[in-house]
Image: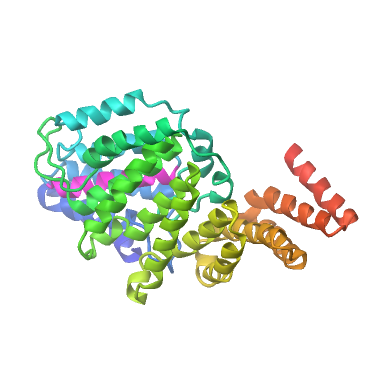
């Protein structure tokens, strides 16, 4: 990626003087820069990704390369998602699909749009889903430990999910969906692009608090990734089945479907464990997220022994190169994992191990990238110290916790 960025002035000049030939070259170079980097390299910031993706979109608009434009728009949607701009990301998914006419045309597409208009942003476990904050992008963690403790939505939400899955999830973003010409496109959305857009749409819906719709779209995205053949180099930039499974599992947990979530996370963990080193290099950041979040969902389900069984593997996955290449991802995950393990040790009657995990969680949370989790770590430590009868130390922890909350 570094070499491509250094050489960007060359395709920019080519696109300026010969748009039809230089435009696709510049668009491809910029799209490459905007894609997630390999696990061993620090990722570019969402702002830089967005800038590159928008420039790639502009370059492709000057050409007849419909697929290149659709891919660039997909990367733009993903960058908006990583920036926390969920409403814009949701609209960007529509725009990327409309290049092929897949969203604007057809009765089913209109039905899906009508379903979106009727959906209430505050329904279907919106609080739990907003707790997730739709940070399930390729490089972002999600706070499953809190979200999974919310109650599930009522049966009416499940009924609506089925109808949304038949419309929004399987028409608006499904690969191979044929579109009309209302948006100026024709043909089929490429399968890899369609699957990736489904994953981005699901996360954007989660960020908007539309949990049941997000679950339906995430399920359709997983099905789309399952149908894909082995990805080529270009398609690897457009997400993966493990990433889509993680999104699906996270959203199931956030809407209270813990057992279903556990099954999805376990499938994802097994899939990652079976991958070769060559395959893992493209999805290595997903593995520690999946294992840490699985522990959180198991704990929230009351399966403390099972959570402790996954704990050592999860802790190991959060060590190594990822800890210094993406500390903003790893440290919060590590703190949440240690808190979950401390709670599990308390529940299984091992206060000494609970104290060790809680103290380690506080130590990690005092580091710059873990500061956002310090409150939950101190709360856990105070509870553990109280269980041990160490009231003086408990008082110190609770006093610091009160100061943090009042700040």
Figure disc tally: 0
Q: Is the magenta stretch mostly helix, strand or loop?
A: helix
Report the residue that reaches farthest toward the right: 392
Report the residue that reaches farthest toward the front: 155
User: In the picture shown, does residue 233 fall above or below 93?
Assistant: below
Q: Residue at x 18, y 41 (%)?
A: 61
Q: Which colour scheme is used?
A: rainbow
Pinpoint residue 336: horizontal percent, then vertical percent.
Answer: 61, 56
Q: Residue at x 37, y 67 (%)?
A: 271
Q: Give the range drawn in magenta.
A: 65-83
Q: Residue at x 22, y 45 (%)?
A: 174
**Is any atom of residue 135 visible in this view?**
no
Drawn side of residue 392 relative to residue 339, left or right: right
User: Is 404 in front, or is 42?
Assistant: 404
Pinpoint residue 243: horizontal percent, then vertical percent.
Answer: 37, 57
Pinpoint residue 307: horizontal percent, then vertical percent.
Answer: 58, 62
- Of the 4 image quadrants, the one containing the N terminus is bottom left
Q: Does the magenta stretch include residue 316?
A: no
User: In the picture shown, does residue 388 fall above or below 396?
Assistant: below
Drawn side of residue 100 relative to residue 354, left or right: left
Residue 51 in which image quadrant: top left
Residue 57 in which image quadrant: top left
**Is any atom of residue 168 visible in this view?**
yes
Q: Which residue is drawn at 44% across and 46% down?
A: 251
Residue 328 in which image quadrant: bottom right
Drawn side of residue 405 relative to residue 290, left or right: right
- Of the 4 image quadrants, the one containing the C terminus is top right
User: Is 92 in front, or is 117?
Assistant: 117
Pinpoint residue 9: horizontal percent, then vertical percent.
Answer: 27, 55
Report the residue that reaches farthest toward the bottom: 277
């Amino acid at each position: 990626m570094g070499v491509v960025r250094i050489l960007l002035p060359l395709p920019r000049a080519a696109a300026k003087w010969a748009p039809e030939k230089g435009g696709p070259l510049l668009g491809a170079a910029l799209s490459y820069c905007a894609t997630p980097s390999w696990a061993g390299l620090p990722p570019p910031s969402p702002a830089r990704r967005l800038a590159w993706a928008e420039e790639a979109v502009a370059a492709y608009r000057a050409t007849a390369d419909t697929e290149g434009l659709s891919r660039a728009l997909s990367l733009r949607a993903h960058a908006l998602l990583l920036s926390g701009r969920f409403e814009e990301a949701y609209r960007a998914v529509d725009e990327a699909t409309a290049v092929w006419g897949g969203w604007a045309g057809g009765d089913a597409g209109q039905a899906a749009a009508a379903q979106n208009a009727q959906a209430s942003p505050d329904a279907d476990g919106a609080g739990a889903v907003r707790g997730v904050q739709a940070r399930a992008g390729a490089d972002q963690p999600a706070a499953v430990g809190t979200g999974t403790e919310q109650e599930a939505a009522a049966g009416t939400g499940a009924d609506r999910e089925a109808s949304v899955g038949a419309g929004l999830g399987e028409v608006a973003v499904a690969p191979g969906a044929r579109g009309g010409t209302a948006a100026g496109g024709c043909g089929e959305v490429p399968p890899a692009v369609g699957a990736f857009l489904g994953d981005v749409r699901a996360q954007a819906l989660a960020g908007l608090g539309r949990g049941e719709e997000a679950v339906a779209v995430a399920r359709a995205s997983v099905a789309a990734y399952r149908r894909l053949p082995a990805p080529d180099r270009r398609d690897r930039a457009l997400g993966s089945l493990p990433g889509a499974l993680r999104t699906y599992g996270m959203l199931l947990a956030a809407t209270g479907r813990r057992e279903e979530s556990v099954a999805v996370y376990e499938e994802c963990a097994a899939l990652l464990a079976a991958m070769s080193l060559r395959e893992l290099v493209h999805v290595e950041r997903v593995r520690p997220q999946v294992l840490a979040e699985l522990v959180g969902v198991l704990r929230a389900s009351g399966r403390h022994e099972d959570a402790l069984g996954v704990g050592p593997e999860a802790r190991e996955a959060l060590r190594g190169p990822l800890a210094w290449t993406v500390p903003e991802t790893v440290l919060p995950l590590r703190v949440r994992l240690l808190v979950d393990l401390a709670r599990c040790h308390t529940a299984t009657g091992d206060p000494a191990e609970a104290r060790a995990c809680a103290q380690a969680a506080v130590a990690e949370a005092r580091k710059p990238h873990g500061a956002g989790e310090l409150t939950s770590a101190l709360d856990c430590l105070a509870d553990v110290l109280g269980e041990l009868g160490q009231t003086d130390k408990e008082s110190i922890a609770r006093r610091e916790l009160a100061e943090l909350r009042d700040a």
